[in-house]
Image (tube, rainbow, N blue to C red):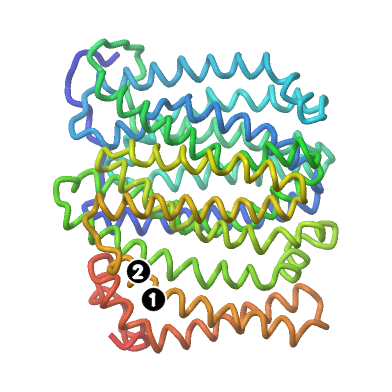
Amino acid sequence: MIAGDRKAPRVRSPRLGWQALKWNYLGNFMRSLSQFVIGILLARLLGPEPFGIIAIAWMMLGIGNLFADLGFGAALVQRERLSNLDLRFIFTCQMAFASLLTVSTLAAAPAIAAYFHKPDGAPVIQAMSLLFVFQCLGETSAAVLRRSLNFKALQQVAIVSYLAGYLCAGLPLAWYGAGVWSLVVAQLLQSLLNSVLLIRLTAVPLAPCLRRDAHDMLSFGLKVTAANLSSWGISNLDVFCIGRAFGVVNLGLYNRALNLMNAPMSVITAGFQGVLFAACSRAQSDRQQVKRIYLETNAGVAMLCLPLFATAAVVPDTLIQAVYGKAWQSSVPLVTPLALAVMVNALLAIKGPILMAGNRVGLELKNQLITLLLFVPALFLAVQVSLQAVAWAVFGTYVVRWLLLAIDTLRVTGATLAEYVRTFRDPVLVGVLVAAVAASTDAVLASLAPLARLVAVAAACGLALAGLLRLLGGRFLKQNLATLVAVERLSSPLRRFLNV
């Protein structure tokens, strides 16, 4: 047993934040690619209804997960000094609250399922409630790895556990007719294996410990929890309303369309969020460095996201039919507003880590609450109209949220509005031109089968993007990514291609 207030044992960390970013992006790409492919196979095997039931369960679990962590994971990363007692205290609090949430969800599951007019979904919600405990087992260990910028280990564990859960259990069970339970078993197995592997990697002390001198961690953690709760409300209130107003099948259609957009967004944002938070936490006293990191990260994310999601927004029919098949045709009208909403959400993802690293979580919370207060009446009106109206309400809400947070983040970092707007100049130009190529190609090749048409659109957009990067890439790197991207480390062919 490890006891006392000794300094926490070091977990080997990479020397450079660039290495952490590289491994985080590589891991997220591999994991998201696996999720994308396996998700398509599961969607074709199971159809919309099982995903609608799982969406209900995930909505309730999402609320609980915000409280289960109590913001301690972020507090652990942000804290300048750390001891074994800190780790034991955090682990004890997380596990105690996770156990309470599991018991509460077990009891409330029948009422939750009845609210969504799906009483047979109660056993699914009850089984999924075990995720609270399974996930919290590894939360402290994961935070220790994030703090030390050891994202290589985090990503290796995440990929192995996902493939074990979904490839080895989920797909076979779906093939043999297990229905929604194939998704349940896959998720439980993934979560448990992920936590066990993380604990083995870090050897974090797990002995129970309660303290009275943890006011600073509690204060920071509760602010993070409140901000996350309001963010969850903005991200999931639409699911709550759709499930109630339009039924489980329509919820499944909405959920899959949204997940299709979220998959590439997760690759982009999840790759830098953890590294951005940890790096800015270590550099929080150097405002100029934080400002440079913020502006350059914004430029990079905009260049990645604007062409991608603008393209998805202009070819919704081709995208849905090629990926999911004709059974999902009803989700086509949702793709355009959701693609635009997810694009804005990707830009939002930069701001939270910056504010948290500077211990300015209160600003994020204030803006989240304002956005939530505007979102509620917008959703109430939208559900009276149509499912598509709900998707457009989501887009409008994300735009308001982005504007509010952008103003405060500029103040915190000291960046000017002109500097911020300048980071969008090339990304907007590239996004508009690539989307125009996509729409034109899609219209010209309308007679082709959906999959062939999607391949042709992707090829045309790829060529257009390559040409634009050849023309603008060198200037963009020098003006917007000089700190984040070391040009001298790029390969010679790539430097010649970008004219740098």
Q: Give the quarter of the image for residue 407.
A: bottom left
Residue 272: percent from left, percent from top? 38, 54
From the viewer's perspective, tell me whether residue 104 is left or right of residue 85: right
Question: Residue at the spot x=46%, y=75% of the render?
Answer: 428
What number is the disc on residue 425? Answer: 1
Amino acid type, label 2 = Val
What number is the disc on residue 5? Answer: none
Q: Give the quarter of the image for residue 315.
A: bottom right
Element type at mark 1: helix
Which quadrant of the figure contains the N terminus? Answer: top left
Q: Which residue in the protein does label 2 denote?
A: 421
Question: Residue at the spot x=26%, y=16% of the render?
Answer: 2
Number of residues whose C-alpha sits closer than 10 Å to that of mark 1, classed few (under 14), some (14–19) or many (20 or more): some
Question: Residue at the spot x=55%, y=37% of the render?
Answer: 233
Residue 374: percent from left, percent from top? 54, 43
Residue 24: percent from left, percent from top? 40, 53
**Taking 130 as reference, is 372 above or below it?**
below
Residue 124: percent from left, percent from top? 73, 27
Which quadrant of the figure contains the C terminus? Answer: bottom left
